[in-house]
Image: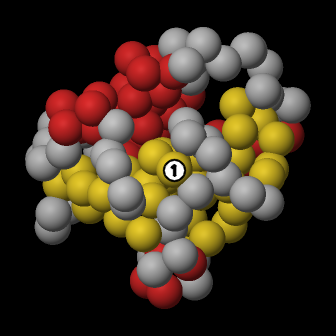
Amino acid sequence: MNAAPDWLRSYLKIPYAEANCGRLVGRVLREQAGLEVPWLYNELDRVEDARWLEEGQPRTEAIVADELASGSWSKVETPERFDVALYSVDGGWHVGVVIDPAWGLITTKSHGSHPYRLRMWLWAQNLEGYYRYVSRARSS
């Protein structure tokens, strides 16, 4: 990343327990792009809580599938700032937000929120796709 955007600093090193992947991406989209995407931080939070009770995985898949089928998201080949990267990890879904065409912001239980290379093999091998929220105009 040549020059990190100024806004990025306030989203680094947030513990996963404070902002899981859906909460982090939803917060960045809301605060920096002016996009309200409540399923990221509402529905996925409820699913994650249920997942610990071994009830959430089918619901997670259903929520993501329903949202992608809603027409609110467009799959894109070349990611841009504030697109969402969707990964299939350990039988579930994980999301990150694109900072620029080479870098994203993600959170993990072991490291909290941090920048990562979009094409790093660990993530690239699990990439389902990049998605752009299209139901509202961007206000970045």
Q: Is residue 119 left or right of residue 28?
A: right
- Frontmost residue, 89 versus 59: 89
Q: Position of residue 71 (x, y in %)?
A: 87, 31
Figure check: 2 above or below 73: below
| Any part of residue 79 in sight | yes
Q: Quadrant of residue 19?
A: top left
Q: Looking at the figure, which quarter contains the C terminus?
A: top right
Q: Quadrant of residue 135?
A: top right
- Frontmost residue, 74 versus 43: 74
Residue positioned 46% across, 46% down in the render: 99
| Residue of label 1 | 100
Q: Looking at the figure, which quarter contains the N terminus?
A: bottom left
Q: Position of residue 119 (x, y in %)?
A: 53, 76
Query: In the current view of this chain or complex, which residue is farthest to the front?
Result: 2
Residue positioned 48% across, 86% down in the render: 121
Q: Helix, strand or loop at disc 1?
A: strand
Q: Position of residue 139 (x, y in %)?
A: 60, 13
- Frontmost residue, 106 versus 58: 106
* Identity, as a three-letter code, of the amino acid under mark 1: Asp
